[in-house]
Amino acid sequence: MTSTSIPPMALARHYYETRRELLLEAGMRVPGWFRLTPDERAVAVAEASLIREAVRRTEKEEKAFQQAVQALSARSRARHLPLV
């Protein structure tokens, strides 16, 4: 399963609860996921969508970078092949 195939609601809930736990450690009280209003939950889902998009773009960038490295490596190897 790639990071972008995680169901949006599950990602939102886990992100929110992880964030809530960190805030609690810092002394800030935040309501649990199941105590959120529909509007608050919609905000959390929107934030998770942003995270999903950022991960998708990162994966796309990494794939392009790896392809460029492989292409350069292949050209470099081709230049150093002996002519027969």
Image (tube, rainbow, N blue to C red):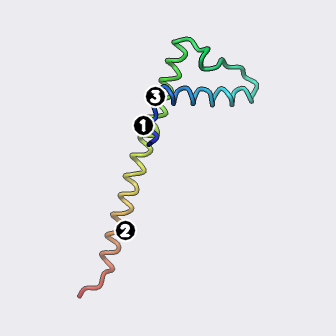
Image x and y of residue 29, in percent: 71, 20
Query: Local crowd at mark 3 within 10 Å, few (<14), some, or many (≥20)?
Result: some
| Numbered disc in front, either 2 or 1 | 1
- The residue tagged 1 is 5
Front-lying residue, 42 or 33: 33
Of mark 2 and mark 1, the one earlier in the sequence is: 1
**At which x and y percent is residue 28?**
72, 22
Image quarter in which the N terminus is found: top left
Residue drawn at x 40%, y 54% is: 65
Residue lying furthest bottom in this view?
A: 84
Count neighbours of disc 2 (C-alpha within 10 A) and say few if under 14, some if 14 to 19, many if 20 or more. few
Q: Residue at x 67, y 19 (%)?
A: 30
Q: Position of residue 84 (x, y in %)?
A: 23, 88
CA gap between label 3 and label 1 equals 8 Å
- Identify the residue position indicated by label 2 in the image: 73
- Residue on which the image places disc 3: 8
